[in-house]
Image (cartoon, rainbow, N blue to C red):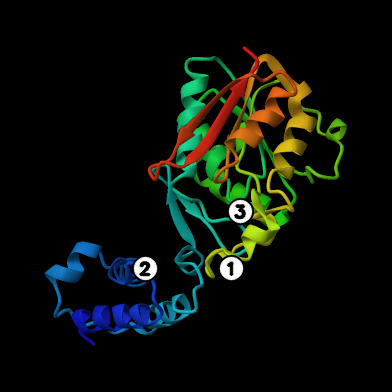
Amino acid sequence: MKLKTLFEELVNILKKADIENPQLEALIIIQEILKIPKHKVFLDLDLEVKDYQEAVKIATERSKKIPLAYLIKKREFFGLEFYVEEGVLIPRPETEILVEKVLQKLGNLKNPVGLEVGVGSGCISVSLLHSKKDLKMYALDISEKALKITKINAEKYNLLDRLTLIKFDVIKDDTKDLNLDKLDFVVSNPPYVSEDEYENLQEEVKKEPKEALISGKVGTEFYEKIVEKFKDYLKEDGFFAFEIGINQAEKVKSILEKIGFKNAKVYKDLAGIDRVLIASKI
């Protein structure tokens, strides 16, 4: 089969399933499965492709609304490539804002110590550690799979010596068993979708783990637990950094203000939606 024919077939499969950007996803599939650079698809359209069945299979699976990141086992985030698979939340571009703002807040602080609650694929902790060479991180998750995948990603960038991975249920477990150092910050992209909101999510988002999406009836339950359990571990000038859902800024601010964190700043994503909240006492 010629490369042009394969590309057209993949685009057709994806279009029929109403996949957004079918041409781009077809290019990604060809690049990842056949190891053909994207630009070559247009420069060498008459190239004969023999082992194309896997590419067609991936496109067919994608047409069932399985996220492409799960099918090709990777996702780019903050300039790094992360291994992902079903069972962990797929890294998203808007979460890069959270990493960027934490790094800005840390500035030139020497040897900071941070904690991530709900590490998932490790994209936040690994990106922070990769960017700030004297940072030490603790990373918690209820999921064994998440901890395993974070370890894979941390190993890839030689960061395990500064990362401590711990299985922990932020709702039920006691922090006394964690043996944490005093923290300069706590960062989290916790579940923040309410039970009602979950029903209206896109079909492919629902292919991601429920426990990484649904917070509870209200949507802010995890923020309350994280603040309650880790406020006393923060240094006097320490801060909380959260990714937040639509219309949650004021609610999360209120949770933090009740414990004296009045210096809160909210940052918008590219769509103009409040996406990140950082709060400190001073």
Instruction: Specify which label sits upstream in the sequence, 2 or 1.
Output: 2
Disc 2 or disc 3, which is closer to the eye?
A: 2
Compared with 66, 209 (above or below) is above
Check disc 2 and report the residue beneath it. Answer: 20
**Residue 54 position in % (x across, y down):** 40, 80
Compared with 5, 221 (above or below) is above
The N terminus - image quarter: bottom left
Disc 3, SS: helix
**Residue 212 position in % (x across, y down):** 65, 54
Could you tell me how far apart the alpha carbons at marks 3 and 1 are, in whole angstroms?
A: 18 Å
Instruction: Specify which label sits upstream in the sequence, 3 or 1.
Output: 3
Side of 253 where 181 appears, left or right: right
* Residue lying at 35% horizontally and 70% vertically, measured from the top left: 29
- Tell me, yes or no, whether the two marked residues, 3 and 1, touch with CB atoms within 8 Å: no
Disc 1, SS: helix
Disc 2, SS: loop
* Residue lying at 52% horizontally and 68% vertically, measured from the top left: 204
* Label 3 crowd bin: few (<14), some (14–19), many (20+), radius 10 Å: many
The C terminus - image quarter: top right
